[in-house]
Amino acid sequence: MLQEGIKAPAFTLPDASGKMISLSDFAGKTIVLYFYPKDNTPGCTREAQAFRDAYDDYLKNEIVVIGVSKDSSASHKKFIEKNNLPFILLADTGRKALTAYDVLNPLGGTLRTTYIINPKGVIQKVYDKVNPDNNAAQILEYLKTADL
């Protein structure tokens, strides 16, 4: 896992429609970048739904929410449609961002980790060993008092 206070590694990955999205596309904005193991699994579904349910609060504060897993764009598209997800999911089938953000376990699985990246592109806060049921609310609570 990366440490707070360092520059967030750059990446470019396809979204659910295959459009290439770069971290730099959101320069000047606060980003919640969450890594999760797999679409349509119980914990990952609950986590995505929690971000969905809190999404209006993120929008009000102009915070970008991006989920990343090693699933394909096609898998993400189905996951988004099934759960009515309003935020971006990126497909890291080559595990480039997963590696850069140090969220792969020794067996190649993804560690559930969330990074808050401030408008200057610096990692402001790291949540490791994330509880999928309260991650979205925990982050909103932090952002209410954070000096970004």
Image (spheres, grey):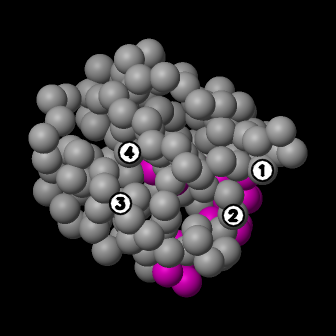
| Residue under label 4 | 32
Q: Which of the two discs, 1 and 2, sits closer to the camera?
A: 1
Residue at label 2? 38
- Identify the element where label 3 is drawn: helix
Q: Which of 37 and 105 is in front in this view?
A: 105
Q: State whether residue 4 is above or below residue 66.
A: above
Name the image quarter holding residue 140: bottom left
Residue annotated with mark 3: 136
Looking at marks 2 and 4 on the same chain, the residue that comes earlier in the sequence is marked by: 4
Tell me the quarter of the picture where residue 108 sits.
top right
- Decide: is 50 above or below 29: below
Question: Does the segment drawn in magenta span residue 90?
Answer: no
Q: Which amino acid does label 2 sit on?
A: Lys
- State the CA–CA distance, disc 3 to disc 4: 9 Å
Q: Mark 1 points at which residue?
A: 109
> Which region is colored magenta?
66-83
| Distance between mark 1 and mark 2 Cα atoms | 9 Å
Residue 145 place in picture, x, y as percent = 13, 41
Quarter that holds the C terminus = top left
Q: Is residue 18 visible?
A: no
Q: Position of residue 37 (x, y in %)?
A: 68, 58
The disc, 3 or 1, on the residue closer to the chain's N-terminal end is 1
Is 75 magenta? The answer is yes
